[in-house]
Amino acid sequence: MEDTMALQNDLTPVVEMKGITKHFPGVTANNQVTLKLYPGEVLALLGENGAGKSSLMNVLVGLYRQDEGEILVRGTPAEIHSPKDAVQLGLGMVHQNFKLVETMTVAENVVLGLKHLDFIPSFSEICRRINTISRQYNLQVDPRAYIWQLGVGEQQRVEILKLIYRGADILILDEPTAVLTPQESGELSRIIAQMIDEGKSAIFITHKMEEIKRFSQRVQVLRKGETAAVLETSKTTPSELARLMVGREVLFRLEKKICCPGEPVLEVKNLCASNEAGRPSLQDLSFIIRAGEILGIAGVAGNGQRKLTEVITGLDRADSGKVVIQGKDMTNRTPLDLIQSGVSHIPPDRISMGIVGDMSVASNLVMKEYRSEPVVKRGIFNYKEVAKSAKEKIDAYNISTPSQNTEAKFLSGGNIQKIILAREIGACRGLLIASYPSRGLDVGAMEAVRLQLIDQRNIGNAVLLVSEDLEELITVADRIAVIYEGRIMGEVPAEKADIKIIGHMMAGASLKGAAQAAAEAELGEDGI
């Protein structure tokens, strides 16, 4: 059988990017990058944070304009000056940092900017079609809900729905499975395969090695803005790809000491809270985390995780129940009270909650130090100490930035996440609330984050880890509790966790019911 690449030599690429170079202040994001996407294939695009993946794709969809290079779509030179030009060429992208208008509804965001739209659109018909697509793709979301009412995971679903609704046939997917259960991820895999069979093509940006094998035929690795390799997926390994990405061997399984929990640090007792519409978001939720242990919370985004972390950290209020931290009732106290009690918080939305984009990297890194010496003396910033503290964190967390004075908004999503991690982990004095801490990070950065969480546990801090990445939960956590519609469906020791059972619990089954469903599914697969 001929090689895939040999067969492609006879095909015209549906997308060809030739010698693309893109500069930003103080940094070259892409340097003479060439990329080819062929009809009916999925190309995986890999690279560590700041390697230029998102910049390259933003050039392709018209959000950026290349400084050098040429783009061909279906063999014809294309001038893509805006996202509107990209849509007309059949290009559609699900962005890692969402491109949604928060004050508009899901339906309004889905059709916003469509050329062929009635002067007075029938939103009932638009909502009906969105609901049909939602059911088909297992990406349920209320089309009449406002974006500001949705969690991060639900907003990601809106981006996927928007792309499907608009009928794009060249798909660019930036971490599309980050907020899906294993079952939904598998369903998306089948849907993408169906789209490819229909003649569509896709570029798939992911940091999950198992997804590369599942989704792609070829893989292109970027490193420091340049192409490091283009390989057939079937002829490479996760270890080789990780080494090409970060330039060293990466540990995919982490060793950790046996958990020896101490006194309770966080006690959540019969907690109830409502959303903006007054409907229950947390329902009689209880758990305990002790010093020196990590409790993982698994669940599809939008099932109360965000409300839970915000109530614990003082960003939102509980209707009833208690939040007790190190023996002290901290229910409905202010965020400053919680910070002063030793609580650190890695929020789920790093752009709107985690940083101030117009402030420098250094200022963002010392946000939790500005009330105390040596960063502040007599109410005045000691800029020498600010620079010193920032440099230590930049070096320790390998934050890629032109300088510590660069505005944070100019950094890649992964490097923004590293800023938040450095600040919050460095300030932790008892309890660390970590919501999706490795979302959008490359395999090398993921390894570092997971080691940091384990280190926090080893020095006696309690960690609440919220994640949809079941591999991460099993690797890092000591116990895993599954949340669905604001209730805990069950809890399992991490070393005995079964991904299929947890996946069913994430879809609403009890622990007993999930175990039975997983067993029945396994029997079905065996043809019994």
Image (cartoon, rainbow, N blue to C red):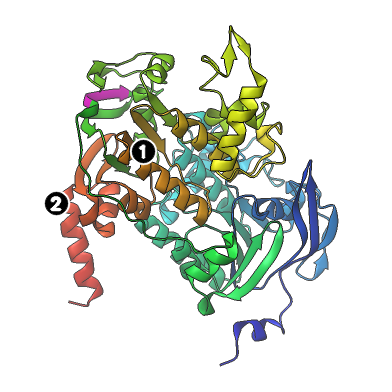
The image position of residue 271, as x and y in percent, is 24, 24
Residue 397, compared with residue 214, is above or below; it is above
Q: Residues within 10 Å of mark 1 (few under 14, many from 20)?
A: many
- Secondary structure predominantly adopted by residues drawn in magenta: strand
Give the amino acid at mark 1: Gln
Which residue is rendered at x = 39% and y = 32% of the image? 306
Q: Quadrant of residue 204?
A: bottom right
Residue 38, compared with residue 449, is above or below; it is below
Which residue is rendered at x = 15% and y = 58% of the image? 516
Q: Is residue 175 left or right of residue 508?
A: right
The image position of residue 76, as x and y in percent, is 82, 68
Q: Residues within 10 Å of mark 2 (few under 14, many from 20)?
A: few
**216 and 454: which one is in front?**
454
Question: Of the residues tagged 1 and 2, which is closer to the observer?
Answer: 1
**123 and 442: which one is in front?**
442
Which residue is rendered at x = 69% and y = 58% of the image? 90
Give the amino acid at mark 2: Lys
The image position of residue 315, as x and y in percent, is 42, 21
In which quadrant will I find the C terminus? bottom left
Can residue 507 be seen in this snapshot? no
What residue would you read off at disc 1? 456
The image position of residue 22, as x and y in percent, is 79, 52
